[in-house]
Amino acid sequence: MDQLNLAVRFADTVARHGRLTATRIDSPNGWVTRTYAELGADVRRLAARLTSWGVQPGDRVLLFALNRPEWSLIDFACLTVRAVSVPIYTSSTPIRCSSWPPMRA
């Protein structure tokens, strides 16, 4: 893959900075930190799941989620398997969501 591809750049960052803190997320019990290695493992797991579901390069995957840390994980997983993530607003109506094209073009 091209070195400018975000999936490649993310994997390089995980390899170089695996032990460093990547995220700090506020929770009711205080701040929860995750390392680049942990995020990289999650992305690889999600990418494998997408592949097991039959997602192929060029397929579209709808992301229907609130703005939260997990959103970026599935986005990087889509990039890893060369799928196209298509985010939609959580405020979209069911009718609007049903008019989206199918996952596979």
Image (tube, grey):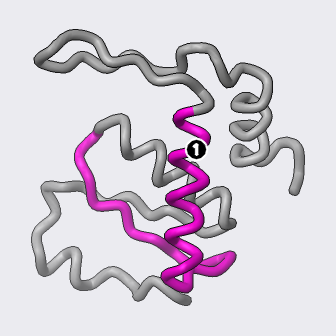
Q: Quadrant of the N terminus?
A: bottom right
What number of labels is visible?
1
Relative to 38, residue 92 above or below: below
Q: Residues within 10 Å of mark 1 (few under 14, many from 20)?
A: some
Of the pair 73 and 6, the residue shown nearer to us: 73
Residue 4 falls in image quadrant: top right
| Residue where numbered disc 1 is placed | 41
Q: Is residue 31 left or right of residue 76?
A: left
Q: Residue at x 50, y 69 (%)?
A: 49
Query: Which residue is at the far right?
Result: 2
Element at badge 1?
Answer: helix
Tell me if residue 58 is in the magenta stretch: yes
Left or right: residue 1 versus residue 84 is: right
Magenta residues, start to end = 38-67
Q: Quadrant of the C terminus?
A: bottom right
| Vertical comparison of 75 with 22: above or below | below
Q: Residue at x 51, y 46 (%)?
A: 42
Q: Nearer the viewer, residue 32 or 6?
A: 32
Q: Residue at x 40, y 17 (%)?
A: 33
Q: What x and y, as percent, mark residue 77?
A: 56, 56
Horizontal side of residue 92 vs 78, given as left or right: left
Give the image location of residue 52, x and y in percent: 54, 79
Kind of residue indicated by mark 1: Ala
Image coordinates for residue 44, horizontal then vertical, percent = 60, 53
Nearest to the observer: residue 25 or residue 64? 25
Q: Is residue 83 left or right of residue 17?
A: left
Looking at the image, residue 102 lies above or below residue 89: below
Percent x, y for residue 86?
44, 64
Q: What residue sits 53% from the left and 36% below the top? A: 39
**Quadrant in which residue 98 is drawn:** bottom left
